Amino acid sequence: MLRGEEAPARLFAALGDATRLGLIGRLSEGSERSIVQLGQDLPISRQAVAKHLDVLLDAGLVRRTRQGREMLFALRPEMVTEARDWLTEVENQWEGALGRLKTFVESQP
Amino acid sequence: MLRGEEAPARLFAALGDATRLGLIGRLSEGSERSIVQLGQDLPISRQAVAKHLDVLLDAGLVRRTRQGREMLFALRPEMVTEARDWLTEVENQWEGALGRLKTFVESQP
DNA sequence: CTAATCCGCAACCAAATAGTTGCGCATTTA
DNA sequence: TAAATGCGCAACTATTTGGTTGCGGATTAG
């Protein structure tokens, strides 16, 4: 339903978890990191971390490249931007609505 | 885990559903709307719509006021801004990291 | 007053989520 | 070569989620 919202919904759903936001925070520091590295300070298993990274990958928020026996993950900031743009649009539409309301009120006798 | 990310996670989780994004889109048009009104064109029951609105309310994305027998919902754009700010921070940190990397590379002999 | 409308509560259900463990394979390291 | 490391696959579990239906109470409309 409302097919136009499905893509951003996937994006926001991927962002809707504290652990994943933490991973994104780490990846926003710039360097690529492996699964074990990313799960270092987390109280969950390596496989749990891998699953979270899969979600981020499916949402397009990260990119991954194999290097030897390691899987390296890096942020894809374009997708972060895309999510942000959606919110900006909502804000703009809201501001526009406020503006029209103001105009309407002022035009009343 | 990573308690600092819990608040934004709730926010993004609330945004992580196409139906709810649709509701937010409607509410961004400016005027307050009732539950029945918001569910008018949706292929789900009134109660399902009400539950979605509860999620948005818990996340702070909407405000509600009772008026007679109706429950009127309106957007709270401050919260939309808050979510957007989190994404902006990630982008900024990433840009900063890129900058530092560039400086480092250029300083290499 | 009666009928229609809007809502809240509760029980229930199926599917998705977040997590676990165990095992085996590939790649490094000692 | 042998041991250790990093990963993937699979099965299993508990909780959350998105949805339903049924019912009763309050408010508005006829």
Image (cartoon, coloured by chain):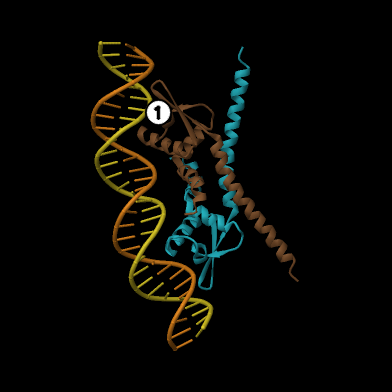
Chain colours: A cyan, B brown, C yellow, D orange
Number of callouts in the render?
1
Q: Is residue B92 left or right of residue B6?
A: right
Where residue C22 appears, x then y in whole percent? 33, 70
> Hey, which quadrant is residue C10 in on the image?
top left
Residue B57 position (above or below residue A71): above
Residue B48 position (above or below residue A75): above
| Disc 1 crowd, CA 10 A, few/some/many (<14, 14-19, 20+) | some
- Residue flagged by tag 1: what amino acid is it? Val
Looking at the image, which is closer to me, A6 or A55? A55
> Hey, which quadrant is residue A95 in on the image?
top right
Residue A25 position (above or below residue B38): below
- Residue at 58% of width from left, 33% of height from top? A93
> Hey, which quadrant is residue D11 in on the image?
bottom left
Looking at the image, which is closer to me, B68 or B42? B68
Quadrant of image for the C terminus of chain B: bottom right
* Residue that protrudes farthest toward the front in the picture: B3
- Residue at 53% of width from left, 73% of height from top? A68
Q: Is residue C5 left or right of residue B64?
A: left
Identify the secondary structure beneath mark 1. Answer: helix
Q: Is residue C26 left or right of residue D19?
A: right
Q: Which chain does the residue under circle 1 lie in?
A: B
Where residue B39 appears, x then y in whole percent? 41, 32
Where residue A40 appears, x then y in whole percent? 50, 64
Where residue C15 appears, x then y in whole percent? 34, 50
Looking at the image, which is closer to me, B5 or A94? B5
Query: Which residue lies under the disc numbered 1?
Result: B36
Residue B94 position (above or below residue B76): below
- Residue at 38% of width from left, 37% of height from top? B51
